[in-house]
Every structure is written in C-alpha cells, then in structure tokens.
Image (spheres, rainbow, N blue to C red):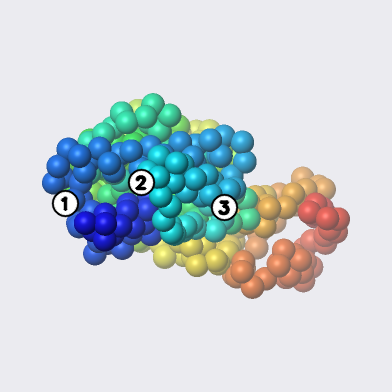
Amino acid sequence: MKEVKGHIDDLIVDYLTGSLPESAMSELKEWIKASPENKKYFLQQSEIWFSTMNRKLASRYDKDKAFEIFKERLERDRGRGRFFKWYYIAGIVVIFMISVFSYWLGEVNLKKNFEQMVVEAPLGSRTKLYLPDGTLVWLNAGTKMVYSQGFGVDNREVILEGEGYFEVVKNKEIPFLIKTKELDLRVLGTKFNFRDYPEDKEVVVSLLEGKVELDNLLNIGNKNILKPNERALLNKQTGKMEIESVTASNASEWTDGYLFFNEELLPDIVRELERSYNVKIQLADTTLNSFRFYGNFTRREQTIEEVMEVLSSTGKIKYKKEGREITIY
C-alpha cells in the first residue's frame, strides 16, 4: 500500500512541476476519478504546492527556496518526508501558470487568486510552453500572455501582448481565440505567428498552416480569412488591414533563435534588438528612421556588438555603446 501511495505521490509532484510524461497522465487521471478521497488528497497536495509558490512569487521568485518550503509543508502535514523532483523552464517568468488539474476535475474556482494565469517572457529571452489543451506556444522577448483557469474546459481564449507562435490543437467545439485591443483571431487548428507589441504601429499575423479568421476591432464588421503563406498587417492608426503573400515560415524563425530582417525600417529593427538583447538603443537623428536593412542573425551565437558591426558595415550608420546603452548616428 505504501509503495502504491508513494508512486501516486511521485505522479502528483511530477504533474504539479510540469514534468509528468503524457504516458502517465491517464494513470493519474483515473486514480483521481476512482474515489472522492483520491480527489481530495490530490487537491490537498495541490493547495500546498500553490500556496508555497504563490507566497514566494509575491515577493521574489526563488525556485529552490519555494521547493524547500513545499517539502517542509508536506513533512509537517503528513508526518514524513519524500524525495521530490523540481522542473522548470529557464528564462520564463510565471506570475502563476497553474497546471491542468482544473481541466480534469472542473474545479474552475478552486482558488480565487488563480482565476487568471499570466505568463511572461522577459527581455532577452524567449519561452516555450504548452497550454492545457496541448497547444504549443512560443513567446518572444517582452511578451505577456493571459488565459483563464478554465482554459480547455469552457473556452480556449488567450490575451496576448507582444509576439507569439502557436501550433493549435484542433477542437471544433471550442475554437481557439486570441484577443488584443485591435484584433481578434479565431482558429480551429493551425500554425501561425501573431505579433502585437504595444509600441508597434501594426499588428502582424502570418499563417503557416490551416485557416484563421481575423476580426478587425478598429473597423467593425471588417473580417478577413487568412490562408497559408499569407500575412495580415493591421495599421493601428487607420484601422486598415492589408493581406499579402509571403514565406510565412520566416515569421517564426525567432523560435529557433534567429532574427530575420527583410528590408525592415531601422526603428523596427531597433525595437526588435532591444527586446532580444535587453539593451536600450537610441537613434540620434530622425533621418535614420527611413533607413532599411536586410539581415539574418542568430541570437544565441551573435552578440549585440556583432549585430551592430554588421549593420554599420553597410556604411549607412555608425554606433557607440556604453554598458547596455547604444546610440546609432
């Protein structure tokens, strides 16, 4: 009996820390459904974990300290200690990403503090995660995504600020929705890149596979269907949306650490470099705003200095760097 309980404890901890393999998901799910006592036990362990993490995240995220507190709480509440695993994705800041136990059990109001999950990718990094329905998401630097605890149960809606690449799992009954201030995107199952940083002048959607419907909130009634290898550009000032043919896969190259500039304006390149390398770049003269550049860089292999050297080698610009601040002139 102890061995069975120990095995279940391991499954629960792996689940709560995001490291439970798919092959073991059904085993844990069936165990939880087997009796009210099992369900209660699972929720108790979840509560301990969430309260531990919530307390630590309220001040400063310290994974090791939070995990130690979690073990201490379990030893105190259950009278014995066990060896537990810790798993996390480097570079991700989570104001709390609850796992999918609410999806299994329908406990959408387990804790008021966890009604909205907020995931952020800090400047200088990118983040990969899976939503409760299995949808793969990459978040680019400086991006925030919000979704509800009921995601996958009664909705598949996310609010995005920044840039994300999505491989959406098909579910005809619950369409996948992305919401921003300017644009709503609706899909059933597809691969696409969605970009809408607050400082950008345009919302850009690039479709790799499938089909998406775009609802232009700046021009009510203006809806468009996007097909593979098409890109939609929504002007935030005029509300005008244009659709053009592109090689859509270029839009998602950042997920592999690449920066791809195809005749991009210098101010747009500057914003991308600031987010990607966590630096501050200033343009000394407004005449620089009209300069365009081509380039393909590998963020994990090339430093910001190397990127600036390539740009300056065109003869169009010069630059100087002091600490994390760069001036282009």
Q: Earlier in the sequence, mark 1 or mark 2?
A: 1
Quadrant (top left, top right, bottom left, bottom right) of the N terminus: bottom left
Q: CA distance from mark 1 to mark 2?
A: 17 Å
Of residue 189 and residue 5, the one placed in the foreground of this image is 5
Q: Amino acid at mark 1?
A: Glu
Q: Earlier in the sequence, mark 3 or mark 1?
A: 1
Give the image location of residue 78, x and y in percent: 37, 43
Disc 2 target residue: 99
Q: Earlier in the sequence, mark 2 or mark 3?
A: 3
Res 305 seen here: yes
Give the image location of residue 228, x and y in percent: 31, 59
Asked if the residue at tag 2 contacts the one at tag 1, i.e. Cβ–Cβ closer than 8 Å, the answer is no
Horizontal side of 1 relative to 307 (left or right) equals: left
Q: CA distance from mark 3 to mark 1?
A: 31 Å
Disc 3 target residue: 64
Horizontal side of 314 relative to 80 (left or right) equals: right
Of residue 234 and residue 61, the one placed in the foreground of this image is 61
Disc 1 target residue: 30
